[in-house]
Amino acid sequence: MVPTANTRSRPYCWVHQYFIHQLPTELLSHIFVLGAEEDPRFPLLVCRICRSWRHVALSTPTLWRRIVLSPHKHMWREHIRRARACTLDIELLSTALAPMRPRPQHYYPQRHLDFYTVQWLMQLALPHLHRWRSFSVIFTEQSPYILNASLSFLANVPSPPSLQEITLIHRLNEDPQPFILFNGFIPSLKRLTIDGPRIALLPNMLTSLIFLDYTHHRFSTGSDTIHEILSLLSLCPNLLFLRLLFPHQFTNHTTVYQKPTRSDPRVSLSSLKQLHLALDPNSFDIPYELALLLTHVSTPTLHTVIFSDPCRRQVPFPNLKSFFWMYAIPRSLQFILIEGGWFDQGMVDPMVKSLPRLKRVILRRGGRSPERVLYNRGWYSMHG
């Protein structure tokens, strides 16, 4: 790559030997931003390619907005400086995420996070609270009070004006007490992911929420679980996407679903378009709580339902017929995705005939079974 003579005055100016040299600066900047969403080390990598790319990177504040908190505070403080007035995406990740995400040495700590380290990192990040656009806490190892160390500072502070997304994942959480976030009022929040922790539910807390990915904690079962989840859903009148997952301990060991022991009010999600019902990979059946919950939820405008089975089982779940006996599929459905143990040939055909607006059904089985697609009332087999 050979720059022209005017490189000093025009940093991104090249002799067009390759196609990438012909890209406009705005497009190249956008590519850099997309790369940074996948790998937090990406902004530093592009700065090392050449002088022109470094100039483009330093002139793109959104490229530096992702802040992965670590003991190397000078690194992410420099990111904050380069982000200028841009909002920030704050992440507090566990060292055990190495198989899941790239973990460069200068971003993530070399030892497991403990209570005092997390508390120290949060105190360093709080001065920039007014600039938070998203906040993610993802812990995969068990450590005493580690979740409390990360969330206790957020109980009595006002919600950042630009906060749109919160992710709280700690499946091994041992603290049954609900956490209060931002005085129970987050008016700008659009996306919420919860797996393990409990949050205190207050009125007008999630009125703007449109995306909810909810994995229930292990501190309640049965009718208490249904009541708690319904209370959460009642605070989300504008929800468009809902994903529900019950961990392995909710697996039902009986073959017949029983009647509920508590009468709960019905919650209407009038704006919901997509419902994703997922099962834990370690589960061998559909939890009774999931079927019971859906009997209390009304979705008049539901467009898509995804029945997800990560293990792609070859045989139907034992309680599959009982589940669909309790769950009345909305007639507004246009798209259905069925995976693994959710599939039963004797149930799919009646389901298709009972939905007048249905346009497409995708069946994904395990093993070597091809993917089957129903399109215009005809079945097609697809490889993949």
Image (cartoon, rainbow, N blue to C red):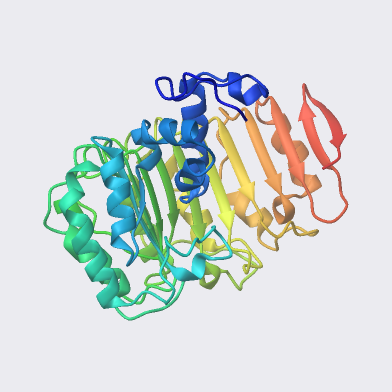
Residue drawn at x 67%, y 40% is 337
Q: Residue 313: image x %, image y %?
A: 75, 59
Nearest the eye: 47 or 332: 47
Q: In which quarter of the view is residue 370 placed?
A: top right
Nearest the eye: 238 or 269: 238
Q: In which quarter of the view is residue 191 placed?
A: top left
- Tell me if residue 74 comes above or below residue 9 in the rendering: below
Nearest the eye: 315 or 180: 180
Residue 96 visible in the picture: yes
Q: Residue 141: image x %, image y %?
A: 45, 75
Residue 176 visible in the picture: no
Q: Residue 239: image x %, image y %?
A: 38, 36
The outermost residue toward the front is 5
Q: In the shown orientation, is residue 293 left or right of residue 309?
A: left
Residue drawn at x 77%, y 21% is 376
Q: Residue 22: image x %, image y %?
A: 59, 18
